[in-house]
């Protein structure tokens, strides 16, 4: 297997940031959007990541606001399925 591409490296960095804060409360990290297609433009396109947390992790979601801000990230959603 060759060296990681830019998308994989950046996605791992973000996932690692969240893993340091939420640990075992991370259920899944999902990469979606143009980064998975030929439409991705390095240096221009953003990365779309969905971080799925356990119920306990959702109660600690406010901790995500202290994570390093990366230029291609938006603030985490505070939407909880149980609040609908």
Image (tube, rainbow, N blue to C red):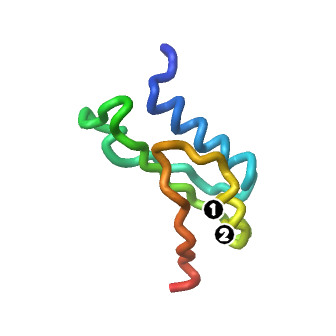
For the residues bearing labels 2 and 1, Cβ distance under 8 angstroms: yes
Secondary structure under badge 1?
Answer: strand
Q: Where does residue 36 sit, x and y in percent of width and height?
A: 35, 38
Question: What residue is at 49 percent from the left and 43 percent from the top?
Answer: 71
Residue that mark 2 sits on: 58
Residue sitting at 46 percent across and 27 percent down? 6
Q: Secondary structure at mark 2?
A: helix
Residue 45 occupies which quadrant of the picture? top left
Q: How far from the left and from the top, in percent, is residue 11?
A: 52, 38
Within-10-Å neighbours for mark 2: few <14, some 14–19, many 20+: some
Cα separation, mark 2 vs mark 1, equals: 6 Å
Q: Is residue 64 above or below residue 42?
A: below
**Residue 44: quarter of image:** top left
Residue 66 vs 58, above or below: the answer is: above
The residue nearer to you, when weighing 6 against 44, is 44
Query: Residue 53, labelled with which disc?
Result: 1
């Amino acid at each position: 297997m060759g060296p990681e591409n830019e998308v994989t490296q950046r996605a791992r960095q973000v996932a690692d940031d969240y893993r340091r804060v939420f640990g075992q409360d991370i259920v899944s990290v999902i990469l979606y959007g143009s980064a998975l297609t030929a439409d991705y433009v390095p240096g221009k396109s953003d990365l779309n990541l969905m971080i799925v947390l356990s119920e306990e992790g959702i109660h600690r979601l406010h901790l995500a606001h202290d994570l390093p801000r990366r230029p291609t990230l938006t603030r985490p959603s505070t939407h909880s399925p149980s609040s609908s």
